[in-house]
Image (spheres, grey):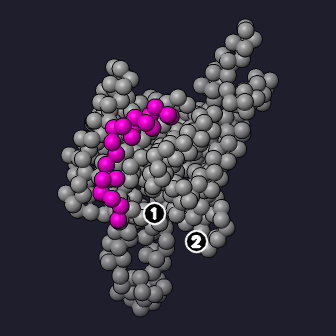
Amino acid sequence: EPGALLVRLLFAHFQQTQQSFAVSPSFHLSTPNTSIMCDVPPGVVTGDNLLKLLQHAKDNGYAIPAFNCTSSSTCNAVLEAAKKNNSPVMIQASNGGGAFYAGKSCKDPNAAAAGSVAMALHVRAVAPYYGVPVVLHSDHCAKKLLPWFDKMLEADEEYFTQYGEPLFSSHMLDLSEEPDEENIAICEKYFQRMVRMKMWLEMEIGITGGEEDGVSNEDVDPEKLYTTPEQVWSVYEALSKIGDMFSIAAAFGNVHGVYKPGNVSLQPERLGKHQAFAKEKLSSESDKPIFLVMHGGSGSTDEEIALAVKNGVVKMNIDTDTQWAYWDGLRAFEAENHDYLQGQIGNPTGADKPNKKKYDPRVWIRKAEESLVERAGVSMEKLSSKGSYEAKVPEAGTLPIYGFKPKDKSPVGAIKEAMHKIGF
């Protein structure tokens, strides 16, 4: 029908042109170190731009580092590192991280969701000032944590209603402890809801060892640490019928926690077998038809990381190493200034000398941030994302302080909203 065709065209046009920020700022450019460039806009990326970014990573042989953050300070340090290294970046909230962000004294059952949403709103407010693409993500969600996932998805839908895009870019379901059939079925259920907002779903099949965020797999059967090509294909076959914006965390010996390189038996060559299996099944021209992600990177050698990326890993989680880096910056500051940090007054330069310039939280927290920035840059270099995006830092005063633009309320906008409600 001509009328239906017109509606579809209008919907597609507005979906492509919808922007969260009301003003297009002027930019001055920093100089990247490589010729690999991705042309998605800076700030939080969702929908088509997110797909474009991850496809660019897969096509150009780099992965985007995903940092678990627990405070505005750690979020800002990650953004600073991304700007400094001309790299896209992912900022992700775990259930425990979200609860911490809301405040440890907050015992409300929705505290983790509220803190995760608060983190996302903070990142949305400041990310454009750093001039790089930012993916807002939530980390491992086991079956027992699904109420947290549900509340974040509610926030995404409310945000979508107001602004035409979800609050977060993507979410992860980790149902790897459940039988494969149940794991995939739950992922299908949520993915059907998420595709309406063009959200990305990350799922895990096969178990990552070690312990993270209260979920322990330290005594798991070693065989379950290695996902088979058939398992990966079963996920792809199910989710690809719903949409194309999904990635798979396939276990290849990964372990959460901190380990010396060589002490973890990683087999990243298995990822290449998953791709080859899917390529044959799909009769695909691409050697890497599947988006893969890597968890439990501590203890991995540079060669193992490089091979994982070569085999289609587009995202790698980083948490333990940056936790240490943040603390190490504070530790070094305290060691250097110990005698100035024993009281408000009195130090080696005089009994009546004030120490405020040492104990002001803005001083020692900044030292922690600087250390995290340096370590995050190491991850960007190892994953080859450094230099993959020309940071577009806005010129002073060109960004709106409250830069969120409500979606179109015109008749065409009303049609768009109605079509979303019916799942178009």
Is residue 38 rendered to the left or right of residue 168?
A: left
Q: Position of residue 124 (x, y in %)?
A: 58, 46
Specify the quadrant that holds the N terminus: top right
Q: Look at the image and say whether residue 408 sits in the magenta stretch.
A: no
Would you call the spot at circle 1 few (<14 residues within 10 Å), some (14-19), or many (20 or more)? few
Q: Is 188 rendered above or below residue 208?
A: above
Q: Secondary structure at mark 1?
A: strand
The part of the chain drawn in magenta is 219-239
Q: Is 209 rendered above or below residue 184?
A: below
- Nearer to us: label 1 or label 2: 1
Q: Main secondary structure of the magenta part?
A: helix
Image quadrant where residue 191 sits: top right
At 28% from the left and 35% from the top, the residue drawn is 273
At 61% from the left and 44% from the top, the residue drawn is 167
The residue type indicated by label 2 comes to Lys
Task: Count the labels in the image.
Answer: 2
Q: Is 187 rendered above or below residue 324?
A: above
Q: Position of residue 100 (x, y in %)?
A: 55, 66
Q: Give the mark nearer the N terminus: 1 vs 2.
A: 2
* Mark 1 vs mark 2, CA separation in Å: 19 Å
Circle 1 residue: 215
Circle 2 residue: 104
User: In this orientation, which residue lies closer to the viewer: 75 or 198?
Assistant: 198
Q: Look at the image and say whether residue 223 sits in the magenta stretch.
A: yes
